[in-house]
Amino acid sequence: MFKFTNIIFWSLIGLSLGACQKSNTQPNPASGQVDDQTKAPAKITSYLTGDAADVNTTTTGGAVLMGGSTDVDEAFRWMIQKSGGGDFVIIRASGADGYNPYIYTDLGGVNSVETFILDSRTKAQDAAVAQKIRNAEALFIAGGDQANYVNYWKDTPVEDAVNYLINTKKVPVGGTSAGCAIMGQQYFGALNGSVTTSQALTDPYNRYMTIGSSDFISQPFLTNTITDTHYNNPDRKGRHFAFLARMTKDWNLNAKGIGVEERTAVLIDQNGLAKVVGSAKAYFLQRYNNSTPEQCVSKKTLTWNNNQQAVRVYEIQASGTVATASASIDLSNWATVNGGVWKFMSSNNGVFSY
């Protein structure tokens, strides 16, 4: 079976994971706009596998937050089922057609899979591409570098099309790694590069802590929520905690977060019920009892202690299938839970506790 393993690594070195499996996948470069960097006609590369004719199926909304590394088959099967077997679209800013044979052939059950490489703002302005996204019955945002997604796609027709699918057409929309990182109302944009737990706790306003708010993807069950991925490689709990401290301090939000370990996916259904599938864990973070950081300022260590109960966390171990995934949390209220474990996060002068 084709598997997408460590997509960030392969994307960075520019290799196509699906290069040897494209016999029924046709590249479809189109031109007509002017690239904002080269001033030459922009060539938008897409890869289509399956039926080129648009179909209309009955869809059910939902969201997939995938933690990165090896993709979770069960999460894609869940999306395919919710798509009604329609057209599955992939968007990304690097890489190639690796998801096409994986979804169309290995998993099956869809009319088509089409991947669009949108690696400039000009390409994200293309009306035909935006319409193709709007026609989708399922959409997945591949891994890569979320700074590119913010720089290229924010405030463009591509952004509008994604939000149309989520909020109007009600189709399943998911993302892995960088694709998951942009799904919350608040998001870590990585505009100056990644940030470590140590850096975030030592100075929560260091130059790498680039957090956007309320200006990109609009997923109703992720209001006041910031996601994080690759949660266990390396351990990112501390930096995620610092993201919530910034959200609380800067915007006085009822800050929340969802952290997902690798080879694991959170499935959020149309009613906001979240379950976890794959092989590891997911973490659902909430600012506790309206607490506020005691010290969250530039060039000083983060203290948000609140008697070691600054942030409450619901930890869920993944199940192998949706059918066996009994543990859950209701994101319509973030209070109704089943099968997981409550824990707490705090920080005292930059020393993190969980």
Image (cartoon, rainbow, N blue to C red):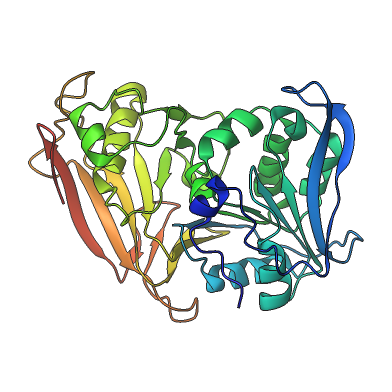
Q: Which residue is drawn at 23% across and 18% down?
A: 298
In the picture, measured across the screen, residue 28 lies left or right of residue 14, that is: right
> Which image quadrant is residue 167 in?
top right
Q: Is residue 253 left or right of residue 31?
A: left
Task: State the count of labels.
Answer: 0
Q: In which quarter of the image is the N terminus?
A: bottom right
The image position of residue 163, as x and y in percent, is: 66, 41
Vertical side of 64 occupied by 311: above or below: above
Q: Is residue 227 above or below residue 81?
A: above
Rendered location of residue 182, percent (x, y)? 52, 41
Q: In this view, does 67 lie above or below 35?
A: below
| Left or right: 311, with 3 as reference point | left
Residue found at the very far bottom of the displayed protein? 324
The residue under the point 73% across, 41% down is 161
The correct choice, above or below, for 71 with respect to 324 in the image is above
91 and 185: which one is in front? 91
- Viewer can see residue 216: no
Q: Is residue 252 visible?
A: yes
